[in-house]
Image (cartoon, grey):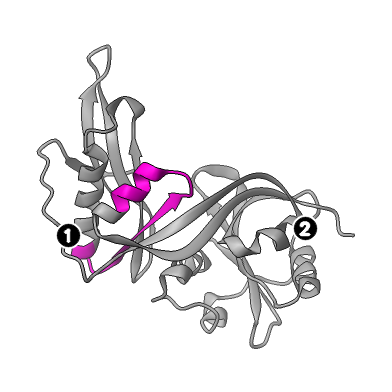
Amino acid sequence: MSTPTSPTKIEHLLNPQDPTDALRWYYAHKRGTQLFVQPENNPTSYLAFSRIGWDLFRFLLTYHFPPSPEATADLLYTHLSADTSLWIIGPATDYNLLSAFFTIQSHKTLHLYTYDHGQSLAPHINVLVQRKTSANGFPQFYIEQPDTNGELTIAASATLNWQSPHFAELNVQTEAAHRRRGWGRAVVAALTQYVLAHGRTPLYAVVDNNAPSHRLATTLGYRDTGYREMMLEATLRPQP
């Protein structure tokens, strides 16, 4: 395995102002990411291995593959051992290519929405919405409600998965018992306002079959970019 390199080497492969490149740009520049390029001079491809909060034992792989399957195989097997298990995020169009090298344990397809700056975000004031700092250091907008024991619990919340100089990706959670009350919309609207006020464009990645989240995005002024992203849980097969 070669020595990890600096993200400055792949500046020509990623556009930080393109929403479809934003997540890969973020992880390539994330502190602690190990970045490997091919070839060493004027790289045309790379692998980025990043630590993630939701799984402390496996890396997240983001990448820019070479044009041929043979070169992709060389890149993967140079930097990964067979039976390595990891998470992968990349364009959904790469699924067949990745399934040729990996055993896929889980697979989600996401639609990438971006906020349409041509829209005016309608004021959406809900006095129940509060703000605090989440565990990852980003702002969290949330609504609390008492549970069956009378203890306050978070019924709906929106925070950021990550942010880059130009973009920030939103994540929203609404407990099943509190859906269809507009609370998810309220916390997403509050976080959208925050991101816009800080000079970034909000992004919202929605699972393919989540119709309520698709509706929420469009009603708040987000538009579907047409880009489909996949998140895989996968294990590298032995090299043929």
Residue 138 visible, this orientation:
no
In the rendered image, residue 212 lying in the magenta stretch gets the answer yes
Residue type at mark 1: give it.
Leu
Q: Can you say which quadrant of the picture contains the C terminus?
A: bottom right
Residue 211 placement: quadrant? top left
Give the CA distance from mark 1 to mark 2. 44 Å
Answer few, some or many: residues within 10 Å of disc 1's Cα (few below 14, many 20 plus, some between 14 and 19).
some
Answer few, some or many: residues within 10 Å of disc 2's Cα (few below 14, many 20 plus, some between 14 and 19).
many
Mark 1 secondary-structure assignment? loop
Direction from residue 78 to residue 226 in the image, left or right = left
Query: Pointer 2: what residue?
Result: 101
Q: Which mark is residue 121?
A: 1
Residue lying at the far top of the rendered structure: 149
* N-terminal label among 1 and 2: 2
Direction from residue 122 to residue 76 in the image, left or right = right
Seen in the picture, residue 80 relative to 106 is either above or below; the reply is below
Seen in the picture, residue 21 relative to 113 is either above or below; the reply is below
Start-end of magenta stretch:
196-217
Kindly identify the residue that appears in the image at 29 percent across and 55 percent down.
218
Kindly identify the residue that appears in the image at 46 percent across and 78 percent down.
15
Kindly identify the residue that appears in the image at 26 percent across and 33 percent down.
180
Mark 2 secondary-structure assignment? loop
